[in-house]
Amino acid sequence: MSYRPDIVFSLAPMDILNDVLKTLRLSSKVFLHAKFCEQWVIDIEPLNLQVSFHVIAHGDCWLHTKEAPTPTALHAGDLVVCLRNTPHYVTNSVELPPDDLPRNNPTTEETPGESTALICGQCEFLQYYWNPILEAIPNIMVIPTKDSAGSNLASVINLMVAEVESGGDGSNAIIDRLSDILFIEAIRKYIQLQDNKQGYIAALRDQRLCKALSSFHKQPARNWSVQTLSEAAGMSRSAFADKFKQMVDMSPIEYVTGWRMQHAYDELTSNGKSVTQITEDCGYQSEAAFRKAFKKQFGIGPGMVRRVAREEPVPVS
């Protein structure tokens, strides 16, 4: 499934966040829904997934990661999203699981005592070259149910748990589609919760930088330069360039080029536009200049990307 959300965000102009999210082209599915009792551990690192997630359907457990000195308590309704195949364990114990404890071994029989039910899934990006939102998100996001209460994310989690437990006709297809929405809603909720002063999301919260970014995303075909971007931000050229670099960790023109190339790749693999049309959409004055920039970014020309995409999806890492 490919999910192309039309989302209105209150935190930044919708054109920016819609643009950076709609190119993800997710394909998601749940691969485990099970009950765990006594001693147990979930470890999916060997699966080498781009994105994995765990919904705590019932009960309590603990998340262990190398990035956190202490484990994180998880409760019913909590969501864990792991990017970049970051090593982690979900277990019944505050202590790290012993090496000889069987991994991913759910309970198959009725067992007295406390139990925990988990829904575990994965998300893949059918095409993904560079996305500033994903670059800004940490390897592991934990969204407690208290932070998502009353939100769309909570509704998706509740629907997913109910659908998994009902097991009705077409349930698997519904759950997989809910998994796509779950990931997008998790990103939205993370953006709402985070208050960092640096990074791309912080730049979207900065009134002047956001004006420049919004102007670019509204008119990517315009002949943008640091000067014209700084004018959109209402700043001097040098002050804008310095602040943009400091917050986003790349120059304004690197951002413009990166986004144009991501957009071009998306257009080549999903729409029937010609290379000439895409050249104009991306703000290049000549097709030769566009082809040169595209090949520099991807190592292959736009024509080859289109030909291969007609045969099968081409994931880009």
Image (tube, helix red, strand yellow):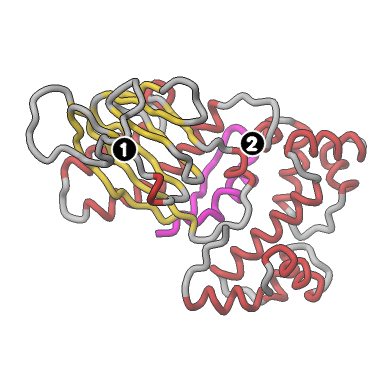
User: Percent position (x, y) of residue 156?
Assistant: 35, 38
Residue at the front extreme, as displayed: 100
Residue at disc 1, secondary structure: strand
- In this view of the protein, which residue sits in the foreground, 106 or 217? 106
Disc 1 marks which residue?
Answer: 42
Q: Report if residue 13 lies within the magenta region.
A: yes
Task: Look at the image and tell me in which quarter the C terminus lies.
Answer: bottom right
Task: Look at the image and tell me in which quarter the N terminus lies.
Answer: bottom left
User: Percent position (x, y) of residue 270?
Assistant: 54, 68
Q: Amino acid at mark 2?
A: Ala
- In this view of the protein, which residue sits in the foreground, 203 or 214? 203
Q: Is residue 137 visible?
A: yes
Q: Is residue 153 visible?
A: no
Residue at disc 2, secondary structure: loop
Disc 2 marks which residue?
Answer: 12
User: Percent position (x, y) of residue 66?
Assistant: 48, 31
Q: Amino acid at mark 1?
A: Ile
Res 143 → quadrant? top left
| Residue drawn at point x = 78 percent, y = 51 percent | 254
| Residue drawn at point x = 62 percent, y = 65 percent | 265
* Magenta-highlighted residues: 1-25
Left/right placement of residue 213 relative to residue 268 reads right
User: Percent position (x, y) of residue 44?
Assistant: 36, 44
Q: Alpha carbon of mark 2 to alpha carbon of mark 1: how far?
A: 37 Å
- In this view of the protein, which residue sits in the foreground, 145 or 7? 145
Callout 2 crowding tier (Cα within 10 Å): few <14, some 14–19, many ≥20: some
- In this view of the protein, which residue sits in the foreground, 31 or 266? 31
Mark toward the start of the polypeptide (2 vs 1): 2
Total marks drawn? 2
Left/right placement of residue 309 relative to residue 179 reads right
